[in-house]
């Protein structure tokens, strides 16, 4: 597995923090348990970068996110093989009646990812709500590819029963329906035995494992979901996908437009891209630090690294007025600075 910093200089802490600012972006709907997404934006010689590990992540895990930010801001990304990447819409765990409003914010897209198994709603009543939400998406977007994401919220029995019901709506795949590599392998085997045609995608079992290739060796998934920040950067993610030997879906870690650019750089560089990417999540924010927000156009996002054709869009740059409006208070600025220092300590020791 490639190291966290492969040929990239580790800047000093002071260099990283010079010009760094923490923003707090409100969300339309609670997503992944949060209503405001905080992110630290860094400015290096290669451009703006994002460092935004989730609040519960410690220094070891956060070090991967910092490595990705250093690659983005101090090294830049590899030359892509495609100029555009397809993007899916993301529907949070909202009531079925609200699905149309959420979908409208994304415009026309080739695929839709639906969040299921919301914390505290994983019993029979919660599964019924999930099925209703998915059914409404299918009704409103009959031609879109449809996938669900449970964020490992179900146990085995619930996942098996829920996926047998959801398969009736033509699922492209189910993302991390249960926890752990062993759990995924067991569920995948049970689905095959039951004749339920649902592919299994591994997310947390790739990005939160010390060995992200273990899921492929265990035969626990049909494809992997990869996110630039949790895996340590575009180049490291490319290496992991290549070693896994599985198809990959590129997704967001609830990034600002600055971080989304890194996701697009990864998707544009993969040798094969059979699935639409989960990179349209800026639509979930009420406001973004980049103006205009980096949203899909006709279900696609353009690479901001010039490829063989020479076509690319400008790399996202924070708007000064938006930076001022969304700037987090000084207490949060200091909290994030300390997180960066701790993550830097991990990188400097490797």
Image: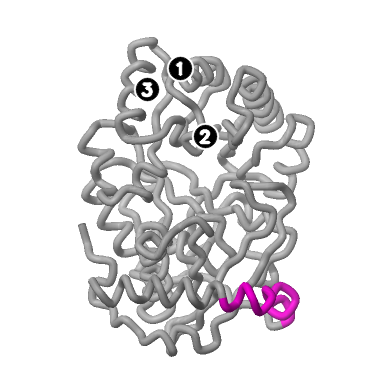
**Is residue 62 found left or right of 294 in the rendered image?**
left
Majority secondary structure in the magenta region: helix
Residue at left offset 37%, top offset 50%: 207
Which quarter of the figure has residue 99? top right
- For the residues marked 3 and 2, what is the alpha-carbon distance in whole angstroms? 13 Å
Element type at mark 3: helix
Residue at left offset 51%, top offset 33%: 153
Q: Answer yes or no: is residue 125 visible.
A: yes
153 drawn magenta? no
Image spot of residue 339 (x, y percent):
47, 71
Would you name the residue on which mark 3 appears? Answer: 187
Q: Crowding near pointer 3: few (<14 within 10 Å), some, many (20+)?
A: many
- Furthest-top residue in this view: 194
Element type at mark 2: loop
**Closer to the eye: label 2 or 1:** 1
Colour basis: one colour
Quadrant location of the C terminus?
bottom left
Q: Crowding near pointer 2: few (<14 within 10 Å), some, many (20+)?
A: many
Residue at left offset 28%, top offset 51%: 210
Image spot of residue 349 (x, y percent):
25, 74
- For the residues marked 2 and 1, what is the alpha-carbon distance in whole angstroms? 14 Å
Task: Please say if 42 is above or below 3.
Answer: below
Would you name the residue on which mark 2 appears? Answer: 150
Frontmost residue, 327 versus 75: 327
Task: Please say if 138 is above or below 165.
Answer: below
Q: Earlier in the sequence, mark 2 or mark 1?
A: 2
Image spot of residue 133 (x, y percent):
67, 28
Q: Which mark is residue 157?
A: 1
Q: What range of the chain is rendered magenta? A: 321-334
Q: Answer yes or no: is residue 315 visible.
A: no
Which quarter of the figure has residue 135? top right
Task: Please say if 22 is above or below 225.
Answer: below
């Amino acid at each position: 597995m490639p190291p966290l910093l492969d040929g990239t200089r580790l800047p000093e802490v002071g260099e990283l923090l010079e010009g760094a600012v923490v923003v707090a972006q409100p969300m339309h709907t609670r997503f992944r348990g949060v209503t405001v997404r905080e992110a630290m934006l860094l400015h290096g010689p290669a451009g703006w970068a994002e460092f935004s590990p989730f609040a519960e992540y410690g220094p070891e895990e956060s070090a991967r996110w910092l490595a990705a930010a250093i690659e983005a801001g101090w090294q830049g990304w590899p030359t892509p093989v495609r100029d555009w990447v397809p993007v899916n819409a993301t529907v949070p765990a909202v009531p079925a009646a609200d699905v149309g409003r959420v979908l409208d914010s994304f415009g026309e897209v080739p695929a839709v990812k639906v969040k299921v198994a919301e914390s505290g709603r994983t019993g029979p009543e919660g599964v019924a709500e999930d099925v209703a939400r998915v059914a409404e998406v299918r009704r409103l977007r009959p031609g879109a590819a449809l996938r669900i994401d449970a964020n490992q919220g179900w146990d085995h029995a619930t996942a098996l029963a829920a996926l047998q019901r959801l398969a009736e709506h033509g699922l492209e795949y189910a993302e991390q329906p249960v926890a752990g590599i062993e759990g995924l392998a067991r569920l995948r085997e049970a689905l095959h035995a039951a004749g339920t045609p649902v592919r299994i995608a591994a997310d947390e079992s790739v990005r939160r494992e010390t060995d992200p290739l273990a899921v492929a060796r265990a035969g626990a998934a049909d494809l992997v979901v990869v996110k630039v920040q949790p895996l340590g950067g575009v180049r490291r993610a490319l290496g992991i996908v290549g070693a896994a030997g599985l198809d990959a879906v590129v997704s967001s870690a609830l990034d600002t437009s600055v971080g989304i650019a890194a996701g697009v750089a990864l998707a544009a560089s993969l040798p094969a891209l059979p699935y639409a990417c989960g990179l349209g999540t800026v639509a979930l924010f009420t406001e973004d630090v980049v103006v205009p927000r980096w949203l899909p156009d006709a279900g696609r996002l353009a690479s901001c690294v010039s490829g063989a054709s020479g076509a690319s869009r400008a790399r996202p740059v924070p708007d000064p007025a938006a930076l001022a409006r969304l700037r987090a208070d000084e207490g949060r600025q200091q909290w994030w600075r300390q997180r960066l220092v701790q993550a830097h300590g991990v990188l400097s020791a490797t």
